[in-house]
Image (cartoon, rainbow, N blue to C red):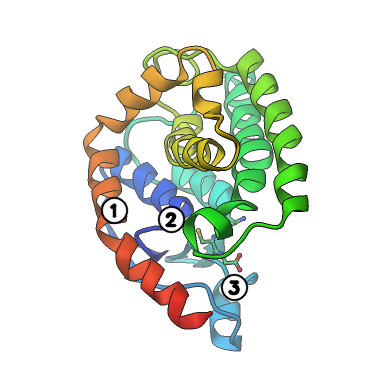
Amino acid sequence: MINVHGFAVSNYYNMVRMALMEKGAEFRTVEAFPAQDADFLSRSPMGKVPFVETPEGFLAETSVILEYIEETVPGPRLLPTDAFGRARVRQVMKMIELYVELPARRLFPGVLMGATNHEQTVREVEPVLRRGVAALTAVLDCRSCVLGDELGLADVLAVFSFPIAGMVTQKVYGWDLVAEIPGLAGTLANLESRPSVRQLSAESRAGMAAFQARIQKKS
Ligand SMILES: N[C@@H](CCC(=O)N[C@@H](CS)C(=O)NCC(=O)O)C(=O)O
């Protein structure tokens, strides 16, 4: 049995939980917040969540955990059977993480955490996101899923990265990056209607007030 550590508002945590839910796997969740003490670092080397406890030990880094789940947990396949197909999914996963999630995250403090974004950050992030969105437009094939009609790990990242990135770019730049990618809004709506995503999103919304209160208390 896998134990998944994280908190409900964390989109990375929700990616891991979604993959397990789509597999129909049994797993346990343990509420955990990022920390830098030695005990936490012994389980998650960067002090981040999510991390998982497997029968063989701890693992961190969402994309790595997702691949581990795909290799070890029975259930519907989330990667294609052919090498090129798998590489295409991984290409999209990496692009979403590097060119959407991470730059958009630099704007989270001002939008979600009650802080102020530095003007320089706001200036730096926009061209990175615009370039990433142009690149993703070229590689995505938005139908019921982001690479056609087969649910896969790219969808797991997409459904928890794009909506929040779009909300953030709308607030900061008056530009919703989701709307820029043809078909993506419809694909995300389809993915959001899956029972796994509905449940995780509801838990995330329910946890938001407590999360913001926690941040306020820490700052
Ligand atoms: N590269 C990590 C990123 C995970 C991450 O940034 N998680 C956030 C919570 S959503 C976190 O733990 N932040 C604390 C920190 O950055 O120190 C992954 O793929 O799992």
For badge 1, the amino acid type reads Arg
Against 135, residue 12 (above or below) is below
The residues bearing labels 2 and 3 have C-alpha atoms spaced at a distance of 14 Å
Against 41, residue 61 (above or below) is above
Whether residue 121 sits left or right of residue 193 in the image: it is right
Quarter residue 5 falls in: bottom left
* Residue at which label 3 appears: 47
Q: Is residue 117 visible?
A: yes
For badge 3, the amino acid type reads Gly
Along the polypeptide, which appears first: circle 1 or circle 2? Answer: 2
Q: Report x, y in % for residue 77.
A: 40, 30
* Residue at which label 2 appears: 13
Q: Is residue 1 visible?
A: no
Tag nearer the camera, 3 or 1: 1
Q: Report x, y in % for residue 171.
A: 51, 41
Q: Secondary structure at mark 3?
A: loop
Q: Secondary structure at mark 1?
A: helix
Looking at mark 3, is its residue's CB closer than 8 Å to ligand 1?
yes
| Residue at the image point whose x is 38% and y is 58% from the top | 9
Count of labels in the image = 3
For the residues bearing labels 1 and 2, Cβ distance under 8 angstroms: no
Tag nearer the camera, 1 or 2: 1
Against 27, residue 158 (above or below) is above
Against 13, residue 76 (above or below) is above
Quarter residue 129 falls in: top right
Q: Quadrant of the N terminus?
A: bottom left
Q: Report x, y in % for residue 116.
A: 61, 61
* Residue at which label 1 appears: 205
Along the polypeptide, which appears first: circle 3 or circle 1? Answer: 3
